Amino acid sequence: MRNLIKLISNNVIWYEAKRGVPYIFKGGYAFAEIVGDMGLKFSNRIRLGFFLQKPNTNYPLHAHDAEELYFFLSGSADWQIEGKKFKVFPGLTISHESREEHATLTSKNPLFAVWIWTGDIHGGYWFASHPGEDCPIDY
């Protein structure tokens, strides 16, 4: 499995996104799309890729119109979905419904995961602290 992840990782384009609001989310995160608008395989119905969050990084409470699923490959983090807080770790799968607020905070290790967006994958994305401000990906 490691060889396959490495092979795919080396053949996708990695982006570091700040979502246009660096004053909310300093440092951003990195993601690569395997399937989707920018992926190795085009789809306008699903987005699937890798997600990498740096150590000691707070990805603040946010939501989006797309439904989302994560499968964690390495690292751990504190995760929040709405008011529920818990730890995520390798092997765990979690999902977010459309418009469900969620956040993550890494500590000393990065977090690496596979992510999938379904449903309204071209819909809005916003931070809970700025609910009226759509924050598209800025590369």
Image (cartoon, rainbow, N blue to C red):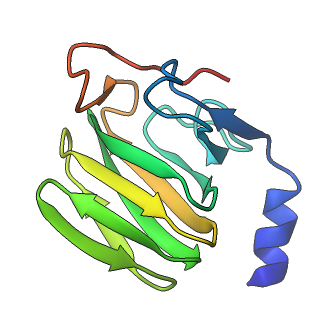
Q: On screen, 98 above or below 56?
A: above
Give the percent coordinates (x, y) of residue 109. Answer: 63, 72
Q: Quadrant of residue 108?
A: bottom right
Q: Quadrant of the N terminus?
A: bottom right
Give the percent coordinates (x, y) of residue 41. Answer: 68, 43
Give the percent coordinates (x, y) of residue 50. Answer: 63, 56
Looking at the rendered structure, the number of numbered marks drawn on it comes to 0
108 vs 124, nearest the viewer: 108
Q: On screen, 26 above or below 7?
A: above
Residue shown at 34%/16% (left/top)?
134
Is 87 on the left or on the right of 39, as rendered?
A: left
Is 10 on the left or on the right of 34, as rendered?
A: right
Is 44 on the left or on the right of 83, as rendered?
A: right
Most distant residue in the top direction? 133
Q: Quadrant of residue 16?
A: top right
Residue shown at 80%/59% (left/top)?
9
Give the percent coordinates (x, y) of residue 36. Answer: 58, 38
